[in-house]
């Protein structure tokens, strides 16, 4: 919540302003009103169980979350986030209201106190270090007077606290009714620990080719109707598109490369007013690199020294080998052509070191678990130093075993660093000693056993760069090609795919787009295309060209799917395999009725297999996979019995129970009962909300407004 984050980060004065806002429930009136500054006016963006969601209120929420989220989240992501939260809160609040669950101020205060950012803030603690409600109230009152916008943010945070507390009470009531008995605990124990051994024959469904099974359209339709829950679909669309990407041509790249080459050498310029010529230094000879690059480069002069690892990997060796004043390039680095000039070099300007930190109580950033004194730390550091200097010592292992520093899991490796990065004494030690040296240095963090692992030169380069981008001529040509393709596909009665084939363009399909989708594979964020596809006036087969950031997309709507049960054609991909499986099972069972294990194996060219220690909790049969029906049948049999033919997941089974082993009885099954209750309780929040949402009548009009 924004107000809580402010309390953590702001200065004392601002903390005082914000903090006083946090107990204004007495002042703000939030507990007696469900309205945060305005009724639900205007048109509705949706309706949940008959309760309209005001578009005005919705837009205010989106604007507020947009201010908090910054530029990283797209508008569609923010809209979806606000809708999901509103949908959840509305559905749950309707249930809570029906049950008459209310939240008192003392309960909300307990929720607020549970936030360390508030309860541990010095502004709200009395002289004994205890949270003071009065200081908190004053904080709210001052915020209301001094910072109205932040106070409004608090009202939203306050409402969120109330909703969270009410919902938690609701879920707690449900959890309280989810007790488990010792008998249920015993069953849980039995399901996990009772075991059976079986002999079995499996006739796999794959023994009958799919081509031998005929499935009619009416059978698919009947199957869909029998399994409605599996074949419900949301409103969606299929499209396909041809993408005309705005990218530089080979001619553009050649021209850009030539332009950067022309800047390397000096040029002679005629000065008409003086009737003289003047030599203009090129990149190779200019003495004012900053000014030259300001005029001629797409990037500014970077004076920072860099190690080899910081240079473009493919050219790092060549760049590091340059002498001062030498040039390298042009070379391509990402979407740029570059020419680099060596300006300066610092030998051994980057050091790689490893260390073992022995900290002590009171040292800077010491882990609270470290209780040794400074004297004890020094003694231990000397011991570790001696151990690290032994011929067979493994420094990395010593670091993992002894270091109190965050680099301990990496064997103490600190990587490469330049002058001034480390604390002064550590810095001087690392740069002042040769590679391989191990020694002890004391800093404000504790005692460091330091090993100098490597040293590298660092260099200062000046880069003359030009971005590789499409020329105006290339962009105009691309527009012409996209327009011609659009016209060919729409006005010449030529199928979309034929027009694409003639132009040698690639058609890319995107299926089952939802109304509030934003990102399309191959095109990234293209909300306008989605809106067009869902427009009621857009018909299947319609084609339209869209201008996008990186070019043009000519899009065709290829299918519409309405909310509800899938059509036979759409459901066939998943329904057909299941229907075939049913028919194959019937055929196998009819052809093999009454056969023994041996007869079944012989008739179907398979073998009798064994499986042992099978449990109901893990019904996996080696060589066959997960087969709960088969294992469950085995537990219902007596030793020595042979089952009837069983339709499993991967084939038809015939099993013989060899052994049934009951797990030893326990004196008490309370542990299993408690574990079962805990696992059930963990599922309550999501399971209850999902059930309520599935039964709710939700009208979602987001796509009309966004």
Image: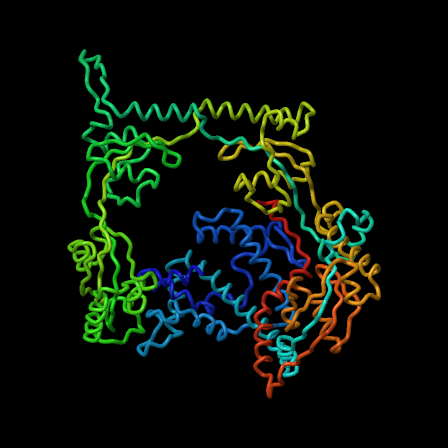
**Residue sitting nearer the eye, 595 or 187:** 595
Q: Position of residue 267 (x, y in %)?
A: 24, 19
Q: For residue 224, say whether it is visible.
A: no
**Residue sitting nearer the eye, 463 or 188:** 188
Q: Residue at x 19, y 74 (%)?
A: 379
Q: Is residue 589 left or right of residue 340?
A: right
The residue furthest bottom is 667
Q: Quadrant of the N terminus?
A: bottom left
Q: Looking at the rendering, which quadrant does residue 330 occupy?
A: top left
**Residue sitting nearer the eye, 486 or 338:** 338
Q: Quadrant of the C terminus?
A: top right
Q: Position of residue 118 (x, y in %)?
A: 39, 68
Q: Residue at x 19, y 58 (%)?
A: 437
Q: Looking at the rendering, which quadrant does residue 319 occupy?
A: top left
Q: Looking at the rendering, which quadrant does residue 528 occupy?
A: top right
Q: Is residue 264 above or below residue 333?
A: above
Q: Is residue 543 left or right of residue 404?
A: right
Q: Position of residue 303 (x, y in %)?
A: 23, 40
């Amino acid at each position: 919540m924004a107000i809580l984050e402010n309390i953590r980060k702001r200065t004392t004065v601002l903390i005082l302003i914000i903090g006083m806002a946090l107990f204004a429930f007495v002042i703000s009136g939030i507990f007696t009103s469900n309205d945060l500054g305005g009724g639900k006016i205007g048109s509705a963006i949706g309706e949940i169980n008959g309760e309209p969601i005001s578009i005005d209120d919705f837009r205010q929420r989106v604007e507020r979350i947009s201010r908090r989220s910054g530029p990283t989240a797209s508008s569609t992501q923010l809209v979806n986030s606000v809708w999901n939260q509103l949908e959840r809160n509305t559905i749950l609040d309707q249930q809570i209201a029906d049950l008459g669950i209310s939240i008192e101020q003392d309960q909300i205060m307990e929720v607020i106190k549970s936030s360390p950012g508030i309860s541990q803030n010095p502004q709200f603690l009395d002289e004994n270090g205890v949270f003071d409600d009065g200081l908190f109230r004053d904080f709210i009152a001052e915020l209301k007077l001094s910072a109205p916008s932040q106070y409004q943010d608090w009202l939203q945070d306050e409402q969120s606290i109330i909703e969270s507390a009410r919902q938690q009470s609701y879920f707690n009531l449900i959890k309280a009714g989810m007790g488990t008995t010792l008998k249920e605990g015993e069953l849980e124990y039995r399901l996990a620990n009772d075991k059976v051994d079986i002999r079995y024959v499996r006739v796999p469904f794959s023994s009958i080719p799919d081509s031998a099974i005929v499935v009619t359209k009416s059978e698919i339709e009947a199957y869909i109707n029998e399994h409605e829950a599996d074949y419900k679909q949301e409103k969606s669309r299929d499209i396909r598109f041809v993408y005309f990407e705005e990218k530089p041509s080979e001619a553009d790249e050649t021209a850009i490369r030539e332009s950067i080459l022309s800047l390397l050498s000096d040029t002679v310029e005629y000065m008409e007013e003086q009737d003289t010529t003047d030599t203009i230094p090129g990149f190779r000879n200019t003495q004012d690199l900053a000014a030259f690059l300001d005029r001629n480069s797409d990037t500014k002069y970077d004076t920072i020294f860099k190690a080899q690892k910081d240079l473009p990997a493919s050219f790092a060796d060549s760049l590091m080998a340059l002498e001062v004043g030498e040039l390298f390039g042009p070379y391509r680095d990402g979407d740029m052509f570059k020419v680099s000039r060596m300006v300066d070099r610092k030998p051994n300007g980057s050091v790689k070191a490893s260390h073992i930190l022995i900290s002590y109580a009171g040292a800077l950033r010491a882990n609270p678990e470290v209780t040794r004194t400074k004297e004890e730390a020094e003694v231990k550091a000397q011991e570790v130093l001696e151990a690290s200097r032994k011929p067979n010592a493994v420094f990395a292992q010593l670091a993992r075993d002894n270091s109190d520093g965050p680099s301990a899991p990496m064997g103490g490796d600190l990587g490469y660093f330049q002058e001034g990065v480390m604390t002064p004494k550590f810095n001087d030690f690392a740069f002042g000693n040769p590679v391989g040296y191990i020694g002890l240095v004391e800093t404000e963090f504790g005692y460091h056993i330091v090993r100098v692992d490597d040293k590298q030169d660092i260099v200062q380069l000046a880069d003359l760069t030009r971005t590789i981008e499409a020329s105006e001529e290339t962009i105009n040509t691309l527009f012409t090609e996209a327009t011609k393709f659009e016209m060919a596909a729409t006005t010449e009665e030529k199928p979309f795919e034929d027009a694409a084939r003639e132009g040698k363009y690639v058609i890319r399909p995107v299926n089952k787009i939802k109304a509030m989708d934003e990102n399309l594979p191959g095109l990234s964020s293209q909300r306008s295309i989605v809106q067009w596809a869902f427009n009621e006036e857009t018909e299947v087969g319609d084609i339209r060209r869209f201008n996008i950031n990186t070019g043009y997309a000519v899009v065709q709507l290829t299918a519409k799917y309405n909310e509800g049960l899938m059509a036979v054609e759409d459901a066939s991909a998943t329904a057909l395999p299941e229907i075939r499986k049913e028919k194959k099972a019937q055929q196998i069972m009819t052809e093999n009725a009454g056969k023994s294990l041996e007869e079944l194996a012989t008739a179907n060219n398979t073998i009798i297999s064994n499986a042992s220690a099978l449990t109901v909790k893990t019904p996996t049969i080696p060589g066959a996979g997960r087969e709960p029906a088969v294992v469950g049948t085995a537990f219902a049999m007596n030793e020595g019995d042979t089952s009837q033919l069983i339709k499993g997941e991967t084939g038809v089974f015939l099993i013989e129970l060899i052994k049934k082993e009951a797990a030893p009885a326990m004196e008490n099954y309370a542990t299993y009962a408690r574990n079962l209750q805990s696992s059930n309780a963990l599922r309550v929040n999501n399971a209850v909300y999902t059930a309520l949402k599935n039964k709710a009548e939700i009208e979602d009009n987001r796509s009309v407004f966004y």
